[in-house]
Image (tube, helix red, strand yellow):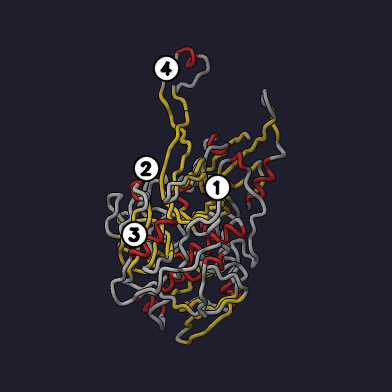
């Protein structure tokens, strides 16, 4: 494994909640603690959801009714699901330093005294994916395909296709791929809300490149927060199981006994990098909303409540004199807050979202991740012992209530995936704008020496509030080489680890 995640973060700061490594890895914690309702008005009433509700063609469930109360026969679910789980091969170029013998002439007459050169070498990684649409849409983890220059998908029947990355979301670690064709086998969507503790589930994937592998376990916990500071994951509501998951399982299916897709296997808890008894999956109710947004809008729509606070604890109950023992305590608000505008006050405890009980940060995030900007939801709070319900119109990451559409695509020559800084990150850095370099592949930014995690502030002295701002800065400034005219970008920003401001000159 070339890289593992030793910690997975949850942020108790601004709840703008809603909902990488070689692709051979699964995310790993070490010493850590182990959707799509797009209507303008949403209540707590449950509805039956299917893949078609998210905009994907999908087969109807045919495995049978879910057995509860006794050990089920898992063979029909296993035999059906392996047909729709694919093996993903990702190839990327990695630049490495190569030491050479010193040439004294180069040293004295302007050569590189460090006596090294940079060259590219191919790196290959592997993972899993799930076909969710008969016309070839595939769901997987972002860290499986992140930075890949070429993605190939092999089906259970050994057919191989070149896949296109439709879009990815690092916050939920979910990505959407597309292969060309029709009548592909699929796994029908289940409802991860209906999972029960102790229920049997199957993990289907390709661990250690062993294709079409099925392991079984039970649901160990729901809405599990794997919280440790320092990570970028915005999901803190994982399904925890004891189904064996290993490197190569990332992006594979978590399936219930009825053969329904209830989660995407994402990471494990381990001291060694291999399975040690715990595995975690992104609930399908979150993952389906993410890929639906990517397909429809080009970017994930996150409904922002705009509150700052923490889970209710016994210490907090005593300190603040709270009248409830569970919920999310509102300590403060974002600069532009949907909750504050609706009448929620500091000291309130959020106890339910759209009729769903809230007893932890993970549950709050899980519920909010299903909504989009502009959705109106019922938020129930306890205020000094009195229960009150507020109708809250969720906002987007920029403070408005409209859907954010990806109006422009980043210039492909840059070879990067960027996203605007979230409101809580801007506040923590004392900024009002900025773009984060989420991932890099072969391209101009990598050639200039920029690394992942770099926060871009200006391009040619123009503030960068959006990707379109960066695109606008590319064309005006031109330079000439012996062969062609090039665009020159002077990019200024900083790395959060050091805080030092750095300037890069990028040629396109």
Residue at figure coordinates x 36%, y 68% from the top left: 257
Label 1, residues with CA under 10 Å away: few <14, some 14-19, many ≥20: some
Horizontal and vertical percent for residue 161?
A: 50, 45
Of callouts 3 and 4, the N-terminal one: 4
Residue 102 is marked as 4
Residue 310 located left or right of residue 508: left
Q: Label 2, on which residue?
A: 2
Cα distance, mark 1 to mark 4?
44 Å
Distance from disc 1 to disc 2, alpha carbons, whole Å, reads 24 Å
Viewer-side residue, 226 vs 107: 226
- Residue 220 x %, y %: 32, 67
Q: Residue furthest bottom?
A: 386
Percent of width and height locating residue 84: 44, 56
Callout 4: SS: loop
Distance between mark 3 and mark 4 Cα atoms = 50 Å
The label shown at residue 285 is: none
Residue on which the image places disc 3: 279
The numbered mark, 1 or 2, whose residue comes first in the sequence reads 2
Q: Residue sitting at 37 percent across and 55 percent down?
A: 7
Q: Earlier in the sequence, mark 2 or mark 4?
A: 2
Q: Secondary structure at mark 1?
A: strand
């Amino acid at each position: 494994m070339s890289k593992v995640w030793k910690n997975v973060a949850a942020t108790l700061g601004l709840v703008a909640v809603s909902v990488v490594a070689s692709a051979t890895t699964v995310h790993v914690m070490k010493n850590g603690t182990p959707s799509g309702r797009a209507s303008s008005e949403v209540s707590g009433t449950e509805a039956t959801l299917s893949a078609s509700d998210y905009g994907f063609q999908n087969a109807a469930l045919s495995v049978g009714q879910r057995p509860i109360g006794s050990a089920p026969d898992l063979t029909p679910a296993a035999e059906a699901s392996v047909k729709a789980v694919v093996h993903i091969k990702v190839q990327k170029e990695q630049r490495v330093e190569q030491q050479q013998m010193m040439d004294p002439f180069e040293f004295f007459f302007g050569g590189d005294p460090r006596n090294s050169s940079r060259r590219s070498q191919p790196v290959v990684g592997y993972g899993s994916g799930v076909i969710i649409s008969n016309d070839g849409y595939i769901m997987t983890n972002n860290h499986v395909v992140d930075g890949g220059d070429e993605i190939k998908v092999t089906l259970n029947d050994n057919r191989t296709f070149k896949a296109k990355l439709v879009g990815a979301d690092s916050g939920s670690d979910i990505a959407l791929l597309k292969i060309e064709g029709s009548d592909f086998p699929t796994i029908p969507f289940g409802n991860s809300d209906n999972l029960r503790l102790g229920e049997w589930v199957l993990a289907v994937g390709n661990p250690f490149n062993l294709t079409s592998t099925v392991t079984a376990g039970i649901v160990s916990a729901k809405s599990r927060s794997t919280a440790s500071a320092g990570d970028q994951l915005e999901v803190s509501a994982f399904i925890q199981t004891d189904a064996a998951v290993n490197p190569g399982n990332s992006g594979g299916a978590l399936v219930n006994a009825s053969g329904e897709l209830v989660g995407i296997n994402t990471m494990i808890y381990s001291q060694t990098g291999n399975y040690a008894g715990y595995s975690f999956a992104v609930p399908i109710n979150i993952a389906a909303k993410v890929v639906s947004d990517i397909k429809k809008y080009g970017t994930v729509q996150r409904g922002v409540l705009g509150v700052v606070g923490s889970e209710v604890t016994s210490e907090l109950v005593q300190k603040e004199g709270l009248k409830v023992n569970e919920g999310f305590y509102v300590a403060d608000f974002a600069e532009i807050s949907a909750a504050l505008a609706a009448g929620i006050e500091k000291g309130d405890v959020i106890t339910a979202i759209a009729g769903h009980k809230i007893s932890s940060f993970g549950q709050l995030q899980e519920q909010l991740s299903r909504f989009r900007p502009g959705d109106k939801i019922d938020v129930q709070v306890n205020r000094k012992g009195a229960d009150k319900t507020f109708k809250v119109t969720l906002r987007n990451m920029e403070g408005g209530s409209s859907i954010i559409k990806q109006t422009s695509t980043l210039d492909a020559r840059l070879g990067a995936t960027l996203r605007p800084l979230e409101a809580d990150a801007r506040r923590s850095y004392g900024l009002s704008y900025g773009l984060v370099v989420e991932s890099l592949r072969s391209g101009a930014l990598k050639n200039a020496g920029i690394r992942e995690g770099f926060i871009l502030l200006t391009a040619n002295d123009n503030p960068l509030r959006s990707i379109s701002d960066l695109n606008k800065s590319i064309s005006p400034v031109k330079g000439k080489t012996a062969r062609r005219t090039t665009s020159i970008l002077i990019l200024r920003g900083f790395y959060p680890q050091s805080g030092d401001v750095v300037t890069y000159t990028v040629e396109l």
